[in-house]
Amino acid sequence: MHPIVLAVTGASAQPLAERAIQLLLRQEFNVHLILSRGAYEVWSSEMNVKIPLEPLQQEVFWRNHLNESKGKLICHRWNHHSANIASGSYKTHAMVILPCTMGTLGRIASGYSQGLIERCADVHLKEGRKLIIAPRESPFNLIHLSNMKKLSIAGASIVPPIPGWYTKAQTLDEMIDFIVIRLFDSLDIELGSLNRWSGS
Ligand SMILES: Cc1cc2nc3c(=O)[nH]c(=O)nc-3n(C[C@H](O)[C@H](O)[C@H](O)COP(=O)(O)O)c2cc1C
């Protein structure tokens, strides 16, 4: 399978991104990871973790932080416009933005490819490849909603990180897994086992 691009932006749901990186590597996927400028800020203020900016140092950071040696991980800076994934000629399986801020959502919806994340999303849409967007904000205003509508019409899947209660999760970790594994269902990728609804 071609690589998966995982973009992480500065919304308040970083544990979801952390678990997604871990599960993708554990399943031996080839992952291109881009953290937005805002994501570094949120990691530092909400998670009390300072993530290295330099890509090679960041790869070592994730390997140690997640205690995961499997898979392939390539980290990119948010402004690395000449990265391979910035071009449609570089084949990828899909792109996931988890979590997605309203800022990044708006920039993609208006075609403003300011950084690598927006450019990559633009490439996935223009190439007709899967783009999964997990918007995190509450409440949504009309601008957020119309940007989501626009992106949905353009071919993206809008998959908000909303928990389901039917799994009867007992811990926060179980709820995080539910959200992350269900999100990757959109790509037909089984990242882990899930207590799925099987009828009443
Ligand atoms: C602790 C913290 C939490 C935030 N949570 C959200 C959020 O849930 N959704 C959102 O759209 N923006 C949120 N923001 C604001 C974005 O991080 C900010 O708009 C940033 O410029 C977005 O940049 P990015 O889209 O490049 O990540 C948060 C900011 C901070 C510092």
Image (spheres, rainbow, N blue to C red):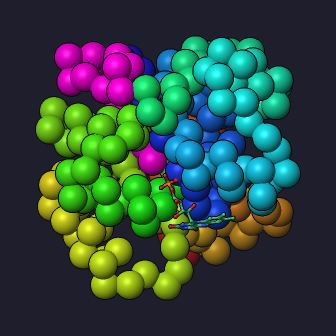
Q: Quadrant of the N terminus?
A: top left
161 w.r.t. 30: above or below:
below
Q: Residue at x 73, y 50 (%)?
A: 43
Q: Locate residue 13 relative to residue 85 in the image: left or right.
A: right
Q: Which residue is depicted at the point 29% across and 67% down?
A: 148
Q: Tell me where residue 130 appears, x and y as whole percent.
A: 28, 40
Q: Is residue 90 magenta?
A: yes
Q: Which residue is nearer to you in this view: 150 or 185?
A: 150
Residue 171 inside the magenta-drawn segment: no
When the figure is inspected, residue 143 is found, relative to residue 175, above or below; the finding is below
Q: Quadrant of residue 135?
A: bottom left
Q: Nearer the viewer, residue 18 or 27?
A: 18
Tell me which residue sits at (36%, 27%) in the image.
81
Instruction: Quadrant for residue 8, please give it.
Output: top right
x then y, percent, for residue 198 = 53, 63
Q: Is residue 178 left or right of residue 189?
A: right
Q: Which residues are magenta?
A: 81-97
Q: Is residue 144 above or below residue 132?
A: below
Query: Does 98 sit above or below residue 159?
Result: above
**Residue 77 in view of the camera:** yes
